[in-house]
């Protein structure tokens, strides 16, 4: 990577984490002492977005990127500068992947629209108008912007795409423009993350004697047509067209403060991965028939598709007896004192995980099984 590329990544990391040690930076980016010193000079002295702490830690200084430069900062008027406002919806490492996806769409001739199944997420601050009614606009911004940033950070953590900020909330997509098979799960992980982070932010506001806030989230999975719109300023927007996104917005309005409401399609795709409580059938504006909705209350006990399949009931295991016998022979060699390593290779969906699951059933009474997900 070039110096500029590393500089951008370090800046995004510092904004997200607030503090990072020089040792961690050297290890993460394979920096020597001179390279690290150049980064420190650029961030601390030239851009003024960071501070040095005892020569060991780099600390985010709370600067707001200005209009002329991505790294320029506004000088605060008070000793306690306001938190940085959300400036760019998409961090650089995700922007690169989105550009790749855009090029792939163009190669498929799908620039006018492509039908995809995605998961849409809407989140906003509950009762935001009442919350900021008696506040000066600058005070309102200082209160609301950190909450918006927490929402966007949660979306980006699970590689979602923030389509737009709605003033007191965000609209995000999972599964497009960056494709993921588990887009519904990613959306719910992001929703739980933003609720947890917002609760901590609300606790901080409460300790400062200020009015805390809550957010509500609505999530729906369905088909949309994605359009890639190139504007005059050469930026590209991905605009989903379809009933699914509107339904996610309606679900958000049904959620309580601190709540996450999901549709039945999202629930079915994530059942087992998350703990949900049925809320019954709800009549939703613009929808003819009542829809079953659910509230997400936490992460469930299952982590993999195989675990979900086991819970629902597996089909009969056939056609892998030779491979199972090879694993059994390796296991016998290991038990006799001859260490063994066995690897299974194959295309997605051919049954690698199921093979290991069946082998584990045969061997778990005689050994300790360690699993990673």
Image (cartoon, rainbow, N blue to C red):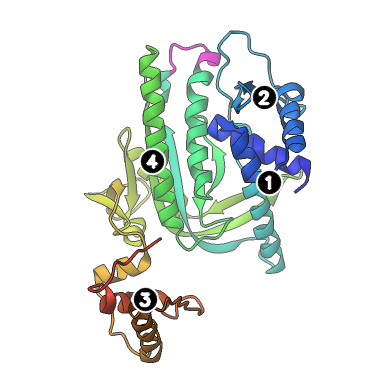
Q: Position of residue 190 (x, y in %)?
A: 43, 45
Q: Which residue is mark 2?
A: 49
Judge whether 244 appears above or below 137 on screen. below
Q: Residues within 10 Å of mark 2 (few under 14, many from 20)?
A: many
Furthest residue in direction front, as rendered: 337
Residue 30 is labelled as 1
Look at discs 1 and 3 and give the one toward the viewer. Answer: 1
Q: Position of residue 233 (x, y in %)?
A: 76, 41
- N-terminal of the pair, mark 4 or mark 2, is 2
Judge whether 203 appears above or below 38 on screen. above
Q: Tell me what residue is drawn at x 33 percent, y 89 percent.
A: 318
Q: Secondary structure at mark 1?
A: loop
Question: Is the Cβ of the residue at disc 4 closer than 8 Å to that at disc 2?
Answer: no
Residue 208 is labelled as none
- N-terminal of the pair, mark 1 or mark 3, is 1
Q: Secondary structure at mark 3?
A: helix
C-alpha span from label 3 to label 4 = 38 Å
Tell me which segment is drawn in magenta.
132-139
State whether residue 88 appears in this view. no
C-alpha span from label 4 to label 2 = 32 Å
Look at discs 3 and 2 and give the one toward the viewer. Answer: 3
Q: Quadrant of residue 28?
A: top right
């Amino acid at each position: 990577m070039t110096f500029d590329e590393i500089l951008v990544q370090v800046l995004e990391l510092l904004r997200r984490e607030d503090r990072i040690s020089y040792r961690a930076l050297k290890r993460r980016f394979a920096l020597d002492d001179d390279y690290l010193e150049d980064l420190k000079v650029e961030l601390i002295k030239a851009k003024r977005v960071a501070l040095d702490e005892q020569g060991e830690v780099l600390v985010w200084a709370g600067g707001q990127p200005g209009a002329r430069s991505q790294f320029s900062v506004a000088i605060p008027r008070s000793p306690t500068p306001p938190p940085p406002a959300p400036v760019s919806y998409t961090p650089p490492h995700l922007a690169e992947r989105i550009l790749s996806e855009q090029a792939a769409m163009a190669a498929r001739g799908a620039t006018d629209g492509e039908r995809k199944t995605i998961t849409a997420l809407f989140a906003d601050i509950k009762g935001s108008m009442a919350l900021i009614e008696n506040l000066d606009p600058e005070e309102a911004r200082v209160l609301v912007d950190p909450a918006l940033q927490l929402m966007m950070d949660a979306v980006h953590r699970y590689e979602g795409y923030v389509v737009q900020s709605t003033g007191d909330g965000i609209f995000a997509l999972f599964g497009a423009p960056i494709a993921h098979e588990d887009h519904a799960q990613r959306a719910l992980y992001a929703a739980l993350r933003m609720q947890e982070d917002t609760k901590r932010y609300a606790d901080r506001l409460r300790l400062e004697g200020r009015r805390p806030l809550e957010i509500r989230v609505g999530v729906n999975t369905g088909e949309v047509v994605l359009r890639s719109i190139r504007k005059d300023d050469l930026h590209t927007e991905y605009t989903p067209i379809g009933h699914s996104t509107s339904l996610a917005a309606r679900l958000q309005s049904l959620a309580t403060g601190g709540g996450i409401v999901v549709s039945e399609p999202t629930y079915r795709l994530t059942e087992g991965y998350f703990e949900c409580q049925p809320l019954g059938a709800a009549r939703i504006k613009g929808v003819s028939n009542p829809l079953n909705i659910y509230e997400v209350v936490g992460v469930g006990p299952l982590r993999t598709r195989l675990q979900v399949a086991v819970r629902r009931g597996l089909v009969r295991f056939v056609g892998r007896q030779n491979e199972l016998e090879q694993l059994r022979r390796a296991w016998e060699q290991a038990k006799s004192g001859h260490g063994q390593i066995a690897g299974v290779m194959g295309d997605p969906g051919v049954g690698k995980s199921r093979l290991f699951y069946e082998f584990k059933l045969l061997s778990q009474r005689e050994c300790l099984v360690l699993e990673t997900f």
